[in-house]
Amino acid sequence: MDQQTSAQAPATSPTPSAPAQPSVGSIAAHRPSTVAASLPELEPDLDADLDAYDVDGALGDDGVELPAGRFLDRERSWLAFNERVLELAEDPATPLLERAKFLAIFASNLDEFFMVRVAGLKRRIATGVATRSASGLQPREVLDLIWTRSRELMARHAACYQQDVAPELGGAGIHLIRWPELTEKEQARLFTLFRHQIFPVLTPLAVDPAHPFPYISGLSLNLAVVVRNPVSGHDHFARVKVPPLLSRFLEASPQRYVPIEDVIAAHLEELFPGMEVRAHHMFRVTRNEDLEVEEDDAENLLKALEKELMRRRFGPPVRLEVEESIDPAVLDLLVQELKISEAEVYPLPGPLDLTGLFGISALDRPELKYPKFVAGTHRDLAEVESASAPDIFAALRNRDVLLHHPYDSFSTSVQAFLEQAAADPDVLAIKQTLYRTSGDSPIVDALIDAAESGKQVLVLVEIKARFDEQANIKWARKLEEAGCHVVYGLVGLKTHCKLSLVVRQEGDMLRRYSHVGTGNYHPKTARLYEDLGLLTADPQVGADLSDLFNRLSGYSRRETYRRLLVAPKSLRDGLVQRITKEIAHQRAGHPAYVRIKVNSMVDEAVIDALYRASQAGVSVDIWVRGICALRPGVPGLSENIRVRSVLGRFLEHSRVFAFGNGGEPEVWLGSADMMHRNLDRRIEALVRVTDPGHRASLDRLLRTGTSDTTSAWHLGPDGNWTRHAADADGTPLRNVQEMLIDARRRRRGPAT
């Protein structure tokens, strides 16, 4: 979210060692009987958006009830977002290895969608708690829509790889081939590799009366193998798991790569000596991997989450991917044993699991990638006349610093801020939220150094950050062992806000330095994610962060702040109030507009406020990366609303809210998306930007990203997205990310 010889590979590559398909009707007689397929008993999805808002009772600007059907379906909108990712892979103008990376991103995104959203929807249907969505669709209709649309997109995804990207990579000297295309020398080399590095870690699992059908772990690649006993003449089924820690594509010779499953398949006789290998087929299962944890207190939560992580591997299946050449009898066996419906089976041309293309996209071929960009130190922090590190505290005493990553270096700004605080003997305390961070994080190291030097260090670790739970538990323990005060936030709420507070002794006074951001304190993703952050010594922001940290770590019930809007109490209402004020300004003839940049726009209360603003004539521009349930351009409802989406080399991740405010613009930035989970079940924070230059800079960013002269996808009232990458004359439109890269290269400040 986050987060690529002259012979070409054929469009559809043959599978290795493909003997004639046997009759496997006898397999069923040699395995234990199973219970008929049925939906398992499941608990409600705690991360689903709840219907707390009265969709049918909302009134428009004229006091008349807003029309039904004014919300787009969020699952369909998510699939449309991933389709935009796929379009970047399909675009010949995208550098070739970046196209491979976008194919991998598409596959990874879809995996998570099935593991969380589809699994949660099935869980709610099974328990009877699923209700009609805000879009008006019944739960089963949404599920059918997902199955149909995802099937179409997965077919396009496979075709893009088979027909375009793989052949073009071959033309560029990077050959993604199958086993029969290897030379004898290459096959011999891979046989040696198999014997010494692959064979020892393989575990073939038989299915017969003494061996029940094995557990198939989520997202693992597997070979369904049919072998015949030459003595009895019976066919048997076995499963061989592809080791997940080995490279997905193996280099047979320089710049020639073959999927690891092809190498295993070509040597199955080594795994089943004395048996006749009749057939093999690749398959892959996606399981429900969302977590359900009852929260009592922090320590119980930690233990419960550790236990739940162990259970995650055993979630029910929600998707079965198989090679389209699979024998029907083998497929029937998998469907029956996995208790999965036919609608959840996805036959595809091999190879399965194209997330493995991340490894290919990382190859050192810079001419096939986006031109290299190295972030520079922000000019307000750069030491022009000295090679020494800047004194960030001195810089912040002079002015606030508005950071825009990855164009401004994270390591010489936010990271340096915390490292300087850890080393400074005048710093008395550091308070920090951590939602996601890297395994070798210099942020964690700085906090540990600070604690070990005697400073008071408070760290809010969100151990429920999805798919980072295990890593966050590890770092929470490490921080505790170093003497940091580690807390896990408030029961029932995820701590998603991005905050740092440093308290420093300066003479006879204490000064507070603050950072409020839109992105995680993750040095690696800061090079790939577009995010904003405000570094400031403003006393009001410092006081607000002190109050908020006290709420998170103690028993404070403060709900109002000076320069912050904080969810779940004041953030939604604060934004709706400001949208409503724009209606009054519009009617009074004063400057009025709303400009918003978010990852997701789903919250019905906020959307209805925007509809009312549009009905009053207020100009509304929405820049959304992913899901958007708002329906723009509907006469009488939203004709003054435009929705744009920008995707590119960086993941658009910042959240900004700008209001005309009658000629005195008001701008906020922070961590919150417009979703129920963010506004109702998370601690989120927005900070008001007060520096006029910073407000103008952010407003300029918003206007550029939503301009018709900038390359973007436009959302229509029917929910369909249309890419606008060129003007009427065919001249390519500028991409906002490229414009910002060019601007950064023109600015002064040393590269880091």
Image (cartoon, grey):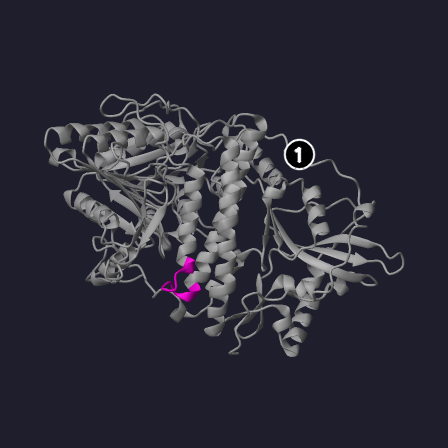
Considering depth in this image, is 646 or 219 the residue closer to the camera? 646
- Tell me the residue that label 1 is attached to: 38
Rendered position, 489 above or below 77:
above
Q: Does the magenta stretch include residue 169?
A: no
Q: Does any portion of residue 9 appear in the rendered image?
A: yes
Percent across and percent down for residue 164 are 47, 65
Rendered position, 377 above or below 589:
below
Q: Is residue 92 magenta?
A: yes
Q: Quadrant of residue 737?
A: bottom left
Residue at position x 39%, y 23% in the image: 555
Rendered position, 573 above or below 287:
above
Percent across and percent down for residue 751 are 29, 62
Residue at the extreme right = 231
Percent across and percent down for residue 314 are 64, 40
- Describe residue 282's horizontal placement relative to residue 556 as left or right: right
Considering depth in this image, is 465 or 152 the residue closer to the camera? 152
Q: Does any portion of residue 436 appear in the rendered image?
A: no
Q: What stretch is highlighted in magenta?
A: 89-97
Considering depth in this image, is 638 or 376 the residue closer to the camera? 638
Count how many numbered circles sit on residues in the image: 1
Other residues around mark 1 within 10 Å, as few (<14) / some (14–19) / many (≥20): few
Query: Element type at marker 1?
Result: loop
Residue at position x 63%, y 43% in the image: 342
Percent across and percent down for residue 328 are 70, 51
Amino acid type of disc 1? Ser
Residue at the extreme left = 589
Quadrant that contains the C terminus: bottom left
